[in-house]
Image (spheres, grey):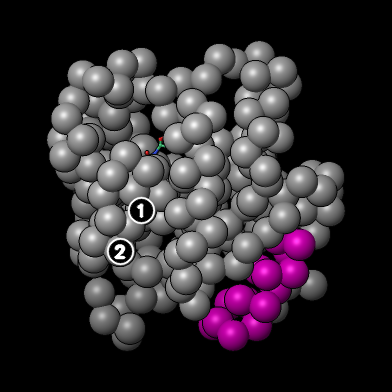
Amino acid sequence: MDHTEKKGLLIVFEGTDGTGKSTQLQLLYKVLHDKGYPVVATREPTDGKYGREIRQLYVNRKKFSHEKELELFLADRREHVDELLNPALRNGKIILCDRYFLSTAAYQGAIGFDPETILNRNSFAPDPDLALLFQTPVDIGVTRIVSDRGDTLNDFEQIESLKKVAEIFSGIDRPYIKRIDATDSIESVHQTVMGHIATLFASSSFLPLN
Ligand code: TYD
C-alpha cells in the first residue's frame, strides 16, 4: 500500500507470554473507543482457517515440521493483511493488533530460523506505526500464566524456549519499537502506553489525545 492510500494507524502489542499485553490492549481500546476514535481490535493468530490450524499446534507442536509451522503463521498473516488490516488502514481506522510479525521473528526464531530472514519473509505485511514491546523477566510471565490465570504452559510457552524468545525480542532493532517495562502495575504500564500513543497521534492526522 503506498503512503497516500494509508489513512489509519497500525499499533501492535508484542512480547512473551504473560507480560500483560492483551490486558493493556483492552485498556487502550476502551479509552480510544470512549473518546470516539475509530478503533479496531484484532489479534494473531486470527480466528480464520489458518489461525484455527495454528491453535492445534498449541496442543501438539510436533504435529507439523518447523517450516510448515512458519508457513502457517505467514499464511494466517497474509489473510489478515488482505482481509482486515489493509482495508481498515485505507478506511482510516486505528488498529490495535495483539501480536504481529515480531512474534514470528522471536518465536519461530527460537526454533532455529534466522529472525532477520523471517522479517524479510513478512515484507508483504505493512510495517506497524508503533510496536509496543512488553518486557518482563520470563519467570514473572510464567508465574502470571500458571498461578494468576490458572493455565498450564502450552507448547509455545515452555520456559527455556521462552527465554530464547525474549532474547530475540531484545535483539530486534526497528525504529517503530518502543520497549515497555511490564513488571510495573497495570495502571502504571497503562500510563506509559498512553504516553506513547499521545506522541504517535501528535505526529499523525488524528486529533491529539487529551
Ligand atoms: P497468544 O497471544 O498467547 O494467543 P492466546 O491468547 O490465544 O493464547 O499467542 C499464541 C501463541 O502463538 C503464543 O505463544 C505465541 C505464538 N505465536 C508464534 O509462535 N508466532 C507468531 O507469529 C504469532 C503471531 C504467535
Mark 2, residue position = 116
Q: Residues in magenta?
A: 192-207
Residues marked 2 and 1 touching at CB (< 8 Å): yes
Helix, strand or loop at mark 1: helix
Which quarter of the rendered picture does the C terminus lie within?
bottom right
**Label 2, label 1: how far apart the Cα atoms are:** 7 Å
x then y, percent, for residue 88:
37, 60
The residue located at (69%, 26%) in the rendering is 143
The answer to whether residue 205 is magenta is yes
* Position of 210 relative to 2 (above/below): above
Residue 56, quarter of the rendered image = top left
Magenta span: chief secondary structure: helix
The residue located at (16%, 30%) in the rendering is 65
Type of amino acid under label 1: Ala
View quadrant of ligand 1: top left
Which quarter of the rendered picture does the N terminus lie within?
bottom left
Q: Which mark is residue 105?
A: 1
Q: Can I make out residue 87 in this image?
A: no
Q: Nearer the viewer, residue 88 or 77?
A: 77
The answer to whether residue 60 is magenta is no
x then y, percent, for residue 122:
25, 60
- Assess disc 1: are there few (<14), some (14-19) or many (≥20) residues with their C-alpha within 10 Å of its C-alpha: many
As drawn, is 23 to the left or to the right of 69?
right
x then y, percent, for residue 127:
37, 69
